[in-house]
Amino acid sequence: MSNLRVFFDLDGTLVDSERQSSQAFLDLLPELDEPVGALVRRYRGMRLAPVLADLEARLGRKLPDDFTPNYRRRVAELFDQHLEPMPGAVQLLEALAVPFCIASAGPPEKIRHSLGRTGLAPYFGERVFSSYVVGSWKPEPGLFLHAANALGFAPDRCVVVEDSDPGLIAARAAGMRAIHFAPDDVASAIACHRRITHLLHLPDVLEDASSAERI
């Protein structure tokens, strides 16, 4: 496996954060009156700006000027109360024998909070990349390409683990191998090299890729 490099998404991949992020919308916008799972499915992997634009269209009104900081604050509160690593995340990072990093669309402060709250920060050190720093958001490939260049990784030797369609599209556009992490066992419409339903399935996928030069 030593010739492969792994890029992890964060939200919904290494940390079980999607429900809290959607619950914050319901807490601040009770007129949505929608199950949290439906919001997760609708907005998974999307940048916040288009999510807010969609909410405004659905509600038929502009959101308050202070909605974004209030939303971020509520998400942070919910993370403090409920955020956990995804099942198998700690065991995987403890055992993974290839270089790896995080490439997340979240703001740096949210990434730091998530990693600190779940105890995953020591596994990554400085190998954490944010769209808000790079200036490129999935499904654009720029975040992955920037991270690969910064770490000296060849894109065609990189494996990206993503739970969302925008992330899978970005990985393919970057010339990387896209693995769809689908803990709910729902396939994506985006073509990918492999789908896994548990993080602890990843080492076997990497072993197959290393020995057969394909996924």
Image (spheres, rainbow, N blue to C red):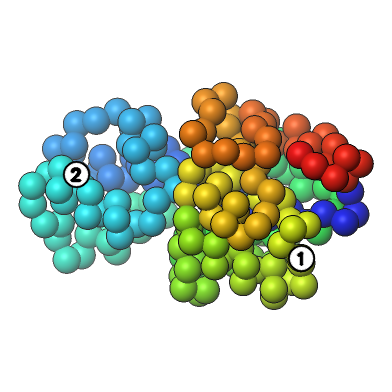
* SS for callout 1: loop
**Helix, strand or loop at mark 2:** loop
Rendered residue at 65%/57% (across/down)? 175
- Coordinates of residue 207 in the picture (x, y in percent): 87, 40
Q: Residue at x 88, y 40 (%)?
A: 212
Query: Crowding at label 1, few (<14), some or many (≥20) Cα neighbours within 10 Å?
Result: some
Q: Amino acid at mark 1?
A: Ala
Q: Residue furthest left?
A: 60
Q: Position of 48 compared to 125: left or right?
A: left
Label 2 to label 1: alpha-carbon separation: 44 Å
Mark number displayed over residue 29: 2
Measured as percent of width and height from the top left, residue 166 is found at 47, 49
Q: Give me the disc on residue 128.
A: none
The amino acid on which the numbered mark 2 sits, given as a three-letter code, is Leu
Left or right of 19? Residue 38 is left
Tag nearer the camera, 2 or 1: 1
Viewer-closest of 98 and 87: 98
Quarter placement of the C terminus: top right
**Residue 148 location, quadrant:** bottom right
Residue 72 in percent (x, y) is at 35, 58
**Is 47 on the left or on the right of 194, as rendered?**
left
Q: Is residue 196 visible?
A: yes
Front residue (pair 205, 8):
205
Along the viewing direction, whichever of 161 and 72 lies nearer the viewer: 161
According to the picture, the residue beneath numbered tag 1 turns out to be: 154
Q: Going 64% across and 46% down the picture, which residue do you hit? A: 178
